[in-house]
Amino acid sequence: MTIARAAAALAVADEGPIALFDLLRQRARLEGRIKAGIDTVLTHGQFILGPEVELLEKRLAAYAGAQHCIAVSSGRDALMIALMAMNVKAGDAVFVPAFTFAASAASVVSVGATPVFVDVVEETCNMDPADLERAIAEVKREGKLVPRAIMPVDLYGLPADYAAIGAIAAKNNLEILADAAQSFGGVSGNRRVGSLAAISATSFYPTKPLGCYGDGGAILTESAALAEAVRAIRSHGRTGSGDAAERLGLTGRLDTIQAAILLVKLDVFDAELRRRREIAARYAEGLKGVVEQQAIPDGMESAYALYTIRVPGRDGLKAKLDGERIGTGLFYRLALHQHPAFKGYNARALPASERLANEVLSLPVHPDLTDGEADRVIEAVRAAL
């Protein structure tokens, strides 16, 4: 069943509750194929690094236009493994946007390095290149840390400004690790996410645009040396069939059943992305002049993991939408420097991140949302404001 036909069949439910994420509708569309894929794995019994994992890696690399793809156990592990492969260590500074999920900074702390928080551009919610330059200069002047890497985050599915960030990285001899946990399927210029930086990490958490039925992730890179290191690290630091740990590693493999599920979802991924973008366009038109919406720069396409608006008095709007049985999300209600876990890492001024934390609200944008449901969301937001 196509997405369009499934949406038409659900039109009768337009007046029911609207979930922020609705994986059950997608499961109903794909159930037979997913069960067949799982049954194949159960039959051959190669539950770890089975043939489906290798096939998925090849297809993901081809889709993104990347040289190498290594499937791993989660998006958080993807970031940590990538940092380990880059030899980021204690005493190193990694520049991370202050407005993102905690896992971005936590992965840096996990390898012994120090996250340095960078403010974001309010209109795009992504890392501010101007503040990045200021943060690098501050770290250099202080002299306590070695500037080592930049971790842009493609928030809500929108690629960061890799052209500007890449120029800053080159000028300061820094590496870039793209946190693409929300953006697989996004586009910048004529390149897809996964090939916008020398190394990228993505997530297959169930609610992501391409999600499995558990935890999962992948690392994409242009470097054969980094790919080799990543493959070793995800399997306890071992290479080939040897027992010796050549380097420190961890248990970071994607299991074969999740790979089988992702292969089925990858078949319909482009159609689902088109539907997400149709819904986003409907919101953009219907909410124009009512709320602030994430700006999509020319030449970029978001994967729309989340459709996020900004409004003063956000909590009041959320309460009213709750009353209308419309699911919403707060991504994120705290900037990273406001989390107790990161208290004391640095005391830079981060005003844009703090404002966004008080104003952002995410609306339903999953590919099985009907036009009628999207219109209900628009009408409810307009009525509430």
Image (cartoon, rainbow, N blue to C red):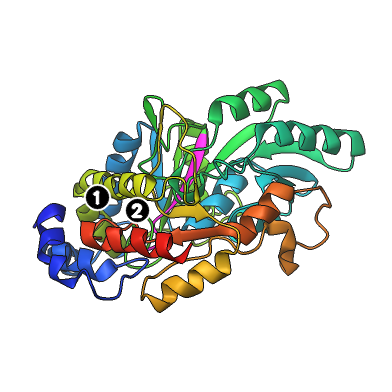
Q: Which quadrant would residue 356 be assigned to in this image?
A: bottom right
Q: Measuring 44% from the left and 40% from the top, which residue is drawn there? A: 220
Is residue 2 visible to the viewer in this orientation of the structure?
Answer: no
In the rendering, at what x and y percent does residue 100 appear? 59, 54
Coordinates of residue 171 in the picture (x, y in percent): 70, 21
Mark closest to the chain's N terminus, 1 or 2: 2
Quadrant of the drawing holding the N terminus: bottom left
Q: Is residue 170 visible?
A: yes
Q: Nearer the viewer, residue 136 or 59?
A: 136
Q: Amino acid at mark 1?
A: Glu
**Where 343 falls versus 228 (above or below)?**
below
The residue positioned farthest toward the bottom in the image shown: 323
Label 1, label 2: how far apart the Cα atoms are: 8 Å
The answer to whether the residue labelled 1 contacts the one labelled 2, judged by CB atoms less than 8 Å apart, is yes
Residue 105 falls in image quadrant:
bottom right
Q: Name the residue at 90% across, 34% down.
A: 141
Camera-side residue of 316 and 201: 316
Magenta highlight: main SS:
strand
> Crowdedness of circle 2 by 10 Å Cα count: few (<14), some, many (20+)?
many
Q: Nearer the viewer, residue 260 or 43?
A: 260
Q: Residue 209 got which mark?
A: 2
Residue 91 shown in magenta: no
On screen, residue 351 versus residue 289, left or right, reads right
User: Residue 179: x, y in percent?
Assistant: 53, 46
Q: Tell me the SS state at disc 1.
A: helix
Magenta highlight range: 199-206
Q: Residue 311: x and y, percent? A: 55, 56
Q: Which residue is mark 1?
A: 272
Instruction: Determine crowd level at label 1: few under 14, some 14-19, many 20+ residues with C-alpha closer than 10 A.
Output: many
Residue type, numbered disc 2: Pro
